[in-house]
Image: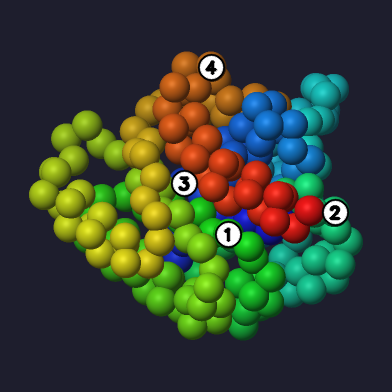
Amino acid sequence: MTILIANQKGGAGKSTLTLVMANYLTTAKNCPVTVVDMDYQQSISQKFDKAKILENAEPYQVVATSLEAYPVLRNIVGKKKEDCVLIDLPGKLDDDGLIPVFQSADLVICPFSYDEFSFTSTILFTVVLRKINPKLPIVFVPNRVKANARFEIMDEVNEQLAKFGRISSMLPDRIDFQRVNTIQTPLSLLSLIVPVFGPIYNHYIHGKHEITG
C-alpha cells in the first residue's frame, strides 16, 4: 500500500507526521514499512543515518530519493500487499514528476493548520490531486494546532475540507513532537497519536489488506 504524506504548503509537519505514522504502524500494528524521503530537507534520512551511527535497531528502512527516480523505485519497494510505503513528498505542485506518484497512491495523509494561507494551499493541493487521481481517499490531519485557535475558523475549514475527504482528530502544537525519530515516538504523545492513526489503520490499511487478500 502506498501512502503519501503531502501538502503543497511547506512547514505543515509532513516529515514529523511521516515518522509518527511509521513508528505507529511498526510498533502498534507490526506492519512492514518503508519510508521514502522525497522532501528537499531530507530530515527523515538524516535522522535514520544518525540512528545507524548510534547502532540502534532499524524498525523500518528509509530511502532518500527524488521525484525523477520514483518510477524506478516504485518497481522495487512495496511489492507485497502487506507492505506500507510511506512517501514524504516535497511541498510543491509545479513538477510533472508528481503525476506518477499521485497516480500510484492508495491513500493521502494531508496535514494542515487552521490559518487562511494553509487552508488555501490545502484546497489547491487537493483539487490538483483529485484531477490526477479522482478516487484517491484523503485524510486531512489538523496539525500543530495552537491552544488559542479560533473555533469559528475551525468549523469553516472543516466544513470545506469535508467535501473532499475525512478530517481526523487534531494534533496539538507540542514540543514533544520535535523528539520523534526513526526509532521511537515519545510515550507522552501516545494519547494524541492513537485517535488519529488508529482510525486510519482500521478504515484504510487493515481494510485494504482484507480486500486485496
Q: CA distance from mark 1 to mark 3?
A: 17 Å
**Mark sitting earlier along the chain (1/2):** 2
Label whose residue precedes the other's in the sequence (3 or 4): 3
Residue highlighted by disc 2: 80
x 75%, y 58%: residue: 212
Q: Is residue 114 above or below residue 195?
A: below
Give x and y (percent) for residue 148: 16, 35
Separation of marks 3 and 2 at Cα, in angstroms: 28 Å
Q: Nearer the viewer, mark 4 or mark 2?
A: 2
| C-beta proximity under 8 Å, tags 4 and 1 | no
Q: Residue at x 50, y 22 (%)?
A: 190
Residue at which label 1 appears = 107
Residue 65 image position (x, y, % from top left): 75, 60
* Residue 143 figure quarter: top left
Q: Residues within 10 Å of mark 3 (few under 14, many from 20)?
A: some
Q: Are marks 3 and 4 in contact (CB under 8 Å)?
A: no
Image position of 157 (left or right of 50): left
Residue wearing tag 4: 187
What's the amino acid at mark 3? Gly
Q: CA distance from mark 4 to mark 2?
A: 30 Å
